[in-house]
Image (cartoon, rainbow, N blue to C red):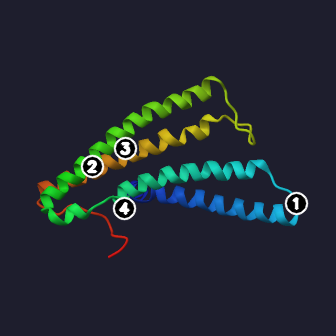
Amino acid sequence: MKFLRLLDENFERWLMFALYSHIVAIVFVEVIRRFVFSYSSIWAEETARYAFIYLVWLGASAAIRDRSHIRIDIIFQFLSEKKKAYFYIAGEVITFVFAALAIYYSAEGVLLTMKFETLTSGLRVSQAWFTFAVPFGLSLLMVRIVQRVYLDVKNIKNNLPVYSGDKMFS
């Protein structure tokens, strides 16, 4: 049970750390290879690019979990805690619907790359592994939305203020 809680709290962070470390290492090595040895590899740039795509989608999911995504929240200063909770829930529901539609259309792209056996230019592996980043990230995002709405409803029932996330600037 403790492992599941740890996984729930840090899943995106662990993957983002691994992907970000990969990107930094690859870019560092490739800069040295290009300017010192006048040689570079296409696979390194390609893996860094695809790692960045996964990193972005994992970041979106983590932002939903921590309620740290970009939003215009000036209106929340004028609302009661209960109304604020309903606004948050409405926003999450709208995001969920958008994510569901986007999964539908992005899955079509993954299936097409599988059907036509499209390969990446440098790695020569199935492009589906990388086009899958979008439905994968959106699926995680939807899981985090369900968790966030559950917690908001729980807070409303217990007359507690909803978690509004940490502010970037005071």
Residue 7: which quarter of the image? bottom left
Residue for badge 1? 38
Q: CA distance from mark 3 to mark 4?
A: 15 Å
Residue 168 position within the rendered picture, expressed as x and y whole percent measured from the top left: 37, 71
Above or below, 24 relative to 109: below
Q: Quadrant of the C terminus?
A: bottom left
Which amino acid type corresponds to the residue marked 1 in the rendered image? Ser
> How far apart, in angstroms, are the residues tagged by discs 2 and 1?
51 Å
Q: Which residue is mark 3?
A: 142
Q: State the image coordinates of residue 121 (x, y, percent, origin top left).
A: 74, 39
Res 163 visible: yes
**Between disc 1 and disc 3, whose residue precedes?**
1
Mark carried by residue 91: 2
Identify the residue at horizontal 17%, vertical 63% (top origin).
161
Q: Where residue 40 sits: x, y (%)?
A: 82, 55
Local SS, label 3: helix
Camera sees residue 1: no
Identified by mark 4, the residue type is: Ser
Badge 1: residue crowd in 10 Å (few <14, some 14–19, many ≥20): few
